[in-house]
Amino acid sequence: MKFTDELLEQNLDLWEGYLKHPFVKGIAEGDLNIDHFRYYMIQDYIYLFDYVKVFSLGLVKCDSFEDQNLMSGSIAGVLWEVENVHKKYMERIGISEDEIENTPVHIDNTSYTKYMLYCGYEGDYFDILMAILSCVWSYHYIAEKINGKDPKAKEHEFYGQWISSYISDEFRSLKEGLVQRANELAKEVSKKQLEKAHRIFRNCSIYEMQFWEMAIKR
C-alpha cells in the first residue's frame, strides 16, 4: 500500500465527514446560505496568504531542483486558485478589499495557518509537505465526490464554479504532484519521521473540518 493510501485510510472518518457537513452539502445541493459562503471566501482568502508562505518554506528547505520545481509550481498553482476561484467569486458577491481588511481573522483560521507555519519553521521538508497536502488533496477529493454523485452540480449557476475549479486539470495536477512526491519521500525517511508525518496530516485534516465548521457557526 502506498504511503498516501495509508494517509487516506487513516483519515477517512474525517474526510467522509467533510461530505456530510452542512457547508459542503450546501455546495453540493446548491442551497448553501450565501452569507455563509461570503464569510468562508473571506477567511479562505486570508488563509491562502499564509498557505503560500508554507510552500515558500518548502522551497527554502528542499535540497533538489526537483523539489524546488514542485514547490515553485505549487505556489503558482495556489495563486492560480486565488485568481480564478476566489477573486472571481468575491467580485460576483460584492466582497470589497475594505471588507476583507476589516473582517477579523477567525481564531480557527489563525490556529490552522500558524500550525502549518510552525511545521515549516521547525520541521524538515517532508513535514512541510505533510502540512500542505491535506488542504489541496481534500478539496480535490470533495469536489470529485460531489461531481461523481451528481455531475449536474457543477452546472449550478453559482456554486458550480467552486466544484469545477477543484476538479480542473490544473488543480488535479497540483494535487497529484504533491501526492507523488510524498510517496517517493516516504520510502526514504525513518519510521519515526513517518509517524510524525501521520500526526501532521491528521492534525491538518482536523483543521480542515474546523474550517468548514467555522464557515457555518463563525
Image (spheres, rainbow, N blue to C red):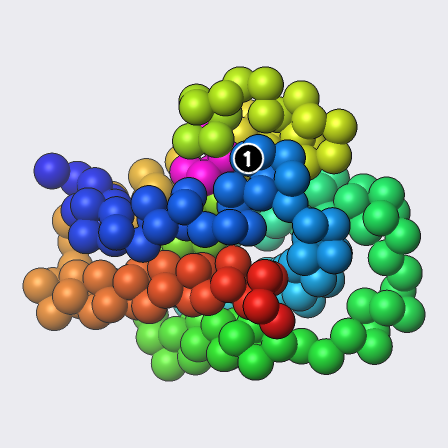
Q: Where is residue 8 in the image (x, y as percent from the top left)?
A: 25, 46
Location of residue 199 (image quadrant): bottom left
Q: Where is residue 80 in the image (x, y as percent from the top left)?
A: 68, 43
Note whether residue 174 is visible: no
Q: Position of residue 70 (x, y in %)?
A: 47, 46
Query: Is 176 left, or right, of 9 in this rendering?
Result: right
| Residue 93 lies within the magenta run | no
Count of labels shown?
1
Which class describes the residues within 10 Å of circle 1: few (<14), some (14-19), or many (20+)? many
Query: Is 68 left, or right, of 216 in this rendering?
Result: left
Q: Position of residue 158 (x, y in %)?
A: 74, 34
User: Residue drawn 85% across and 48% down?
Assistant: 93
User: Residue drawn 83% across and 74% down?
Assistant: 101
Magenta residues: mostly which secondary structure? helix
Quarter of the image with the C terminus is bottom right
Figure check: 151 above or below 89:
above
In magenta, the rendered stretch is: 140-144
User: Residue drawn 77% across and 75% down?
Assistant: 103
User: Residue drawn 83% across and 77% down?
Assistant: 102
Figure check: 9 above or below 205:
above
**What type is the residue that disc 1 sits on?**
Ala
Note whether residue 5 is visible: yes
Q: SS for tag 1?
A: helix
Quarter of the image with the N terminus is top left
Query: Which residue, given by chain and number where applicable, does mark 1 sit on?
Result: 28
Location of residue 217 (image quadrant): bottom right
Observer-nearest residue: 8 or 118?
8
